[in-house]
Amino acid sequence: MPTLHRLTTALLAAGLASAALAQKPADQPGACTDFDAYANAEWLARTELPPDRARIGSFDALRVANDRLLEQGLREIATDPSRARTPGLKLLSAHYRAGLDTASIEKRGLSAVQPWLARIAKLERAQLPALIGEMARLQISAPVAVFVGTDAKDATRHALQVSQAGLGLPDRDDYFGTDDNSRKLQAAYRVYAERLLKAAGAPADAATIDALMAFEQDLAQASMTRVQRRDPNAVYNPMTVAQLQQQAAGFDWAAWLQAYAGLGANQGLIVGQPAFAQGVAALAEKAPLETWRTYLRVRALDAIAEHGPQGVAQAHFDYTQGAIRGLKAAPPRVEQLILMIGGRTGGSPLGETLGELFVTKAFSPAAQQRALAMVADIKLAMQRRIDALPWMSEPTKVLAQAKLAAMAVKIGGPEKWKTYEGLVLQPDDFAGNLLKINAWHSAQRLADLNRPVDRSRWNTSPHIVNAFAAGGNQIVFPAGILQPPFFDEKADDASNYGGIGMVIGHEITHHFDDRGRQFDAVGNLRDWWQPADAAAYKARADQVAALYSSYEPVPGVRINGRQTLGENISDLAGIQIAFDGLQIALARQRAAGQPAPLIDGRTPEQRFFLSHATVWRGKYRTEALVDQLRTGAHSPGRWRILGPLSNIPAFAQAFSCKPGDPMVAATPIVVW
């Protein structure tokens, strides 16, 4: 079996080697004092943030490595379009060439949104709902987002869903904050809006921007907080359009839906935030028409700014990447294009065809089979943990085991790639292509209203460095994350279980976290818990929330333990069941007469935890870290090491930690 030294060599070549397996600086803290500093000391000492990065760590380094592979493939199909042999790759070739053609981007200017700007300039109040509905087809959520998704209470059917949207600041709370960070963001957004409006030749004086900010503040006031939106029952409000009209009079919802989808007043909807719909209706009646025009201009321009000419693209970068995330310079153009085409979170309509390009270059059937074997071990570990829970009654355990057994697994990429019928893109119209893609995607999803849910469909890009607990009780591991240092089919089990194994455990646990536990074995939102078990679970979840709320990564800015609760529960339990999964694999090896060796003087258990620390190491710009703390669902990487490991007795045993050591919780928190 290949040794960890072999894996370390591979990681060094990629700039990802773990310091714990190399040299130990003289001032390196002990493992029982600060495991992040212990495991990552050399990396933390030598790593500097480049000016075009808001954060750097294993996730980011792997994304860059994946982008290099994609760049090679994109260059091939762009320089020789005949090599784009599938419909998706032909579209990708055209769109990528359009993104490289900066001369055409400058020549076209704002032509992609000019028809919309012209309509906005002539807008009358009675035309407002229809215009907002038509813009929504282009995925310009101003101010209402509408989409077709799985019905949370019937995972076999699709439903038309309406949600709050349309704010320019990162979070609704930013409109009311008086701290330095909030004021900085408010000022930066004012400048951004002014630059967009000036680029379009629209009014952009101080009074106009003041009115825009007041308008968006009213929208923010009507919006749910991020913590409130985590309650799946609170955002599940089924009604017809006619019933929505009764609740939120003042806005013609029937005209809006007719313009968006050609559907009538009897159409069923799931409204995420009825109070927000009421807020929109109130603004439709009372807000000055010119303020609506300003708001819609800014939203339309923002939608294409990153894809547009230098003036608006630079304004977009200065605000979204400079002010919000602290970047000092833009990444290379090709890297930006991959993000724009694939989507930053992997959900772009063309993202699947980027994934098609990636999978052919970087993922093998052997890797898929080894990953599936790891999933089986870790699911078995979770099964045993459920059986052993002292606080859960037998009826709830039976249903929990049924849910675990029914959990579907997707690894790598789809078996059948999209063919994109009806979508035509031009190699010299980057922003125009974006709106065509969005309109095509809206039409495709609207057609889903008349179809049952296809559980085989991939809704994320296979090249993305991420993993997902998807609706319908599924876990998804794209090929993009099944790469070193998370996973190496040639590496030893300890390294893989501490890397991708932890990710597998994390995603399994998401279906049992404070939100996921409310869905049953087929993915329906329903209460399947005995009341006493639900209360016992909540008490443990409250402990997790309190622990993480005690962490203060930036002076004056703590982790929001409620906002990050699902991720923190999944981290805590995920690493535990991954460790248990490793023990299952090691027992199998011992039974076969192949006990795991010491490698570089480390036991398999030590290598497991060192691999985990390598995955979550990182450095942030202060702006990016504050943004994550205020708006993110995840705790920063350092606390994804310290929080879980300090609550795992197996970690203390592996490194001979003693009670009272900083990495040993006095009373470990155990949820699963």
Image: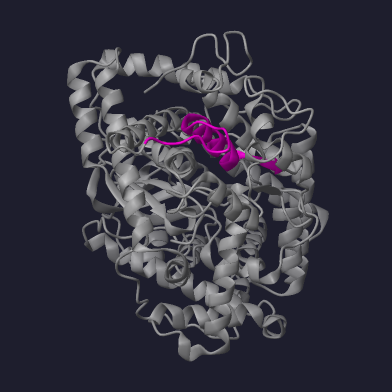
Q: Give x and y (percent) for residue 488.
A: 47, 52
Residue at 49%, 78% (x, y): give it.
92
* Residue at horizontal 49 percent and vertical 41 percent from the top: 495
Q: Nearer the viewer, residue 409 or 499?
A: 499
The answer to whether residue 600 is magenta is yes
Find residue 110 and report its image quarter: bottom right
Q: In the shown orientation, is residue 59 left or right of residue 194?
A: left
Residue 601 image-quadrant placement: top right
Nearer-the-camera pick, 168 or 255: 168
Give above or below for 632 relative to 76: above
In the rendered view, how is the structure colored?
A: one colour
User: Where does the magenta region start and end?
Assistant: 595-619
Instruction: Name the residue rendered at 58%, 34% in the picture.
Output: 635
Res. 243 in view: no
In this orientation, which residue lies closer to the viewer: 247 or 361? 361
Q: How many marks?
A: 0
